[in-house]
Amino acid sequence: MKKVVFFFLLSILFASVFGFKVIMVTDIGGLGDGSFMDGTWSGIVKACRELGIEYDVIQSKEQSDYIPNLSKAAELADVVFAVGFLMSDAFYKVAEQYPGTYFVGIDFNNGQNLPNVMTFTFKEQEGSFLTGYLAAGMTKTGKVAIIGGIPIPPVQRYAIGFLAGVKAYNKLHGTNVEGKLVYANSFVDPKKGKELTHSLIGEGVDIIQQACGGTALGIIEAVKEENNRISNAKDLHELIDFLYENGGFYMLGGDVEQEWQAPGHILASAIKRVDVASYLGVVKAFNGDWTSGNVELGIKEEGEGISRMPYTKGLVPNKLLAEIEYLIKLVKEEKLIIPSTNEELEAFRIGKIEFPF
């Protein structure tokens, strides 16, 4: 009898685990961007592998795919992820039609409260504030820039934070570094990213923050071309030596630690922990710890930050690194509030900050 009960319970366990499925639906950016989409997918994969549950992805080619793709996912899965601000309207329409399916939205929240919906948004301005401050401290030309994809709210916050970081560095160090914002108007146009990068470098910009998804692949290509042209470096060691002695051109990554994509050419990355958000979404749904509503992640919640700079940290003065760590501390203590709107950026005053070193 005990054996019968044991195998019955075991069969229930196997049915619950292997019958549970997660599907991620991308926006038109798709996988392969090396940042936002790939980062979200990595969190889903990590959670599903740990829990031993099935997972899949449906990639959208155009915006008209959103509703049919989300609907298809809802019919096949227990948890549906919609990734990207552009999917917001379709996401809520489909979620209403499938109340028995969990829906997780990454990077948007329209304020609508549905019991089967959990969304994650980010204080993008906090991560890019740190890379903006770093860029202002590292530029040799006194000119830095950010290339945005489409001017949607998350990208606008990226830009505002970056420019606020430049503004803060200028105030605290008495410098006059220029920060410029341009838009590619696409998240999937590497050619445009490359053209904009060469144009900005022609204007004297030497450090460029990306906030444009797959379009940033063109920024990386252009930066590599420029550095290879001036350095003739045969390997990473020679490149780092050249950059240390002479300076060069850098991209600043976005959303995930992008440095591995072009070692030496990417100075640092503004971290947006979309992988943490997607991981939590899977775990909460599977474990029955579901809470509807929106979760906002910033530096204080370990959802925003700056990368470890695995290849380039030695290029950054220790004092500048220490200043960034101290600014992180102030943000966590809510003694430093990073602007998130253009109006707040205009009014932003860093105040008197005395570094304890």
Image (cartoon, rainbow, N blue to C red):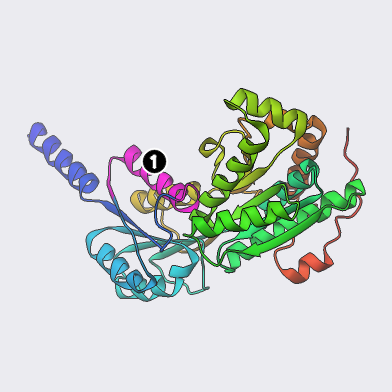
Q: Quadrant of residue 322?
A: top right
The residue positioned 67% from the left and 60% from the top of the image is 159
The residue positioned 39% from the left and 73% from the top of the image is 90
Q: Nearer the viewer, residue 76 or 255?
A: 255
Instruction: Tell me if residue 34 is in the magenta stretch.
Output: yes
Q: Quadrant of residue 167?
A: bottom right
Q: Is residue 311 above or below residue 24?
A: above
How busy is the neighbourhood of tag 1: few (under 14 within 10 Å), some, or many (20 plus)? Answer: some
Q: Quadrant of residue 236?
A: top right
The residue positioned 72% from the left and 47% from the top of the image is 206
The answer to whether 76 appears left or right of 147 in the picture is: left
Query: On the rendered image, what quadrant is the C terminus found in?
Result: top right
Q: Nearer the viewer, residue 120 or 341?
A: 341
Task: Give the magenta part as a residue range.
Answer: 33-55
Instruction: Tell me if residue 257 is in the magenta stretch.
Output: no
Which residue was labeled with disc 1? 46
